[in-house]
Amino acid sequence: MATEPAAADVARARRTQTRLAAAMVVGSITSVQCGAALATTLFDEVGSSGAVLLRSGFGALVLLALAGRGLPPVRQWLERDVLLFALALAGATLCFYAAIERLPLGVAVTFEFLGPLGVAVFGSRRRRDLIWVALAATGIVLLSNGGSGGGLDALGVALAVIAAGFWALYILQSARVGEIHPGMGGLAAAAIVSTAMVAPIGVADGGVDLLAPAVLAVGLGVGLLSAAIPYALELEALRRLPSAVFGVLMSLEPAAGAIVGFVALSQGLSLVEVIAIGLVVTASAGALRSAGTLVPRDG
């Protein structure tokens, strides 16, 4: 008889841990989107590339601290897989920030999420996953028509789709680098190399304004919101959640982007655009649940 209350207590504790982990993932998603919204305030002064440099630089410092002694030797930073990983980080962030300079945050995130959606679908062998492709395609067609018929910025859409491709590369390279360099060391090394890659573009775009105290302060905030806080929350969440569940929760990101864009940036969306984002969220959740794919954080 005594074992029944004990079993009930264990089950209750597990449910509590699961809810806590889910809250951590939602907090991570919200933090990243708030970081992106904050980054847009830097565009007028240092441009989108300058904002990327600040985010990458401060983010790399955070990852360096998290990696500690797990950081691989400098000679391994130029290995093919680490370089591709760094290229994915740089490309995804540069293109995404350039996209949110031209598109509402929620719309840009929706296009970018085609990257992990594509990895999940192409990694599956189930015919029913074509349903998720159809749902996502419907949502993208609705978004591409501009929702209310006004049309979206074509360059912004192209940049968001390119960012999706880089995010897909990031997911694939994350697995490869993770096998070679356990822990946070490989990611930290790639983040440092990625910062070096974006530095010339960021400096050309931002110039001496990058050194302004107010700009550095906002850049630090972007780095914390986009890297330090989400990485800490996701590391703890992954200790409590299966990766498949984590991936499904991450599919909420387009919706979070739309909400943060509306609240923080006063970016309204038409009903059709809301429906389109909902279709992509549904497609992403279904595909990720089916494939059991983990969706790492970009940038």
Image: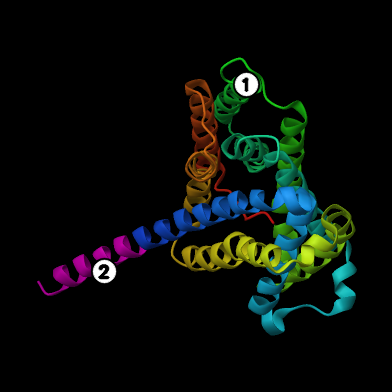
Residue 74 horizontal side relative to residue 21, left or right: right
Which residue is nearer to you in this view: 47 or 87? Answer: 47
Instruction: Give whichever of 202, 279 is nearer the camera.
Output: 202
Element class at badge 1: loop
Spot occupied by residue 10 in the image (x, y as percentages of width and height)? 26, 69
Q: Is residue 55 left or right of residue 133?
A: right
Q: Residues within 10 Å of mark 1 (few under 14, many from 20)?
A: some
Which residue lies under the disc numbered 1? 146
Q: Nearer the viewer, mark 1 or mark 2?
A: 1
Answer whether residue 157 is magenta in the image: no
**Residue 122 in the image: above or below residue 81:** above
Query: How far apart in space, not on screen, are marks 1 and 2 (Cα)?
Result: 50 Å
Left or right: 268 in relation to 116: left
The residue under the point 48% across, 25% down is 275
> Observer-nearest residue: 197 or 286?
197
Q: Main secondary structure of the magenta part?
A: helix
Q: Quadrant of residue 128?
A: top right
Occupied quadrant, residue 156: top right
Residue 228, image x, y percentages: 59, 68
Task: Give, as a single range, the part of the protein colored magenta.
Answer: 1-17
* Residue found at the very far bottom of the displayed protein: 69
Q: Which corner quadrant holds the N terminus?
A: bottom left
- Amino acid type of disc 2? Val
The secondary element bearing badge 2 is classed as helix
Residue 147's place in the image compared with 226, above or below, is above
> For the C terminus, which image quadrant?
bottom right
Q: Would you name the residue on which mark 2 appears?
A: 10
Across and down, in percent, residue 277 comes to: 53, 31
Label 2 Cα crowd, 10 Å radius (few <14 / some 14-19 / many 20+): few
- Figure check: 141 above or below 2: above
- Image coordinates of residue 69 in percent, x first then y, are 70, 85
